[in-house]
Image (spheres, rainbow, N blue to C red):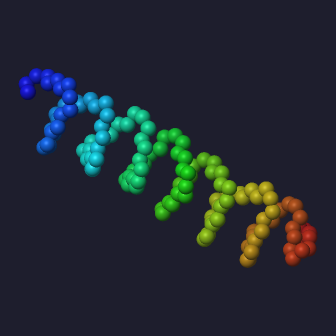
């Protein structure tokens, strides 16, 4: 076909379909694998059911997770992080002050440099900081 072809009913192509140029589709249903050799620009929602493997994921706005997040590498957070529960299985290093606005319970050895201000309890006794 050298010019425009118009079909008023279904087209049944029983072989490969090679389209050079732009293709405008109102609905596209893919029953098996779709391979893209360039960028995909999705200007609406993307709903994926099943596993999604991504080499790089950049999120520009809020990401909401309704289940657990399993991060098997380092987690670098810049800014405030609000955690309801924090469990640390190994060493935690702080490069600045720690502000504990409640009681601090330590099971094990507490090694401290300077302790300043407030009352200190040791084995159910108040210790004088002087």
The residue depicted at 81 percent of the width and 65 percent of the height is 115
Q: Position of residue 54 (x, y in %)?
A: 38, 52
User: Looking at the image, which residue is at 18% across and 34% down?
Assistant: 11
Question: From where the camera sits, is residue 74 visible?
Answer: no
The quadrant holding residue 1 is top left
- Residue 25 in percent (x, y) is at 28, 31
Q: Which of 35/29 is in front?
A: 29
Foreground pick, 124 / 117: 124
x 55%, y 51%: residue: 66
Q: Is residue 43 visible?
A: yes
* Viewer-nearest residue: 75 or 40: 40
Q: Nearer the viewer, residue 79 or 84?
A: 84
Residue at far left of view = 2
Where residue 85 appears, as percent x and y from the top left, is 67, 59
Residue 127 located left or right of residue 19: right
- 107 left or right of 7 in image: right
């Amino acid at each position: 076909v050298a010019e425009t072809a118009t079909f008023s009913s279904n087209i049944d192509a029983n072989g490969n379909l090679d389209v050079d140029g732009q293709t405008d589709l109102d609905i596209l249903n893919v029953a098996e694998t779709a391979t893209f050799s360039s960028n995909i620009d999705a200007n609406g929602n993307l709903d994926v059911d099943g596993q999604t493997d991504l080499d790089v994921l950049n999120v520009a706005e809020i990401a909401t997770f309704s289940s657990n997040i399993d991060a098997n590498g380092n987690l670098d957070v810049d800014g405030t992080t609000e955690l309801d529960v924090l469990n640390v299985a190994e060493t935690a290093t702080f490069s600045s002050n720690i502000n504990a606005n409640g009681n601090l319970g330590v099971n094990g050895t507490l090694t401290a440099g300077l302790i300043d201000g407030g009352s200190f309890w040791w084995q159910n006794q108040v210790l004088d900081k002087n």
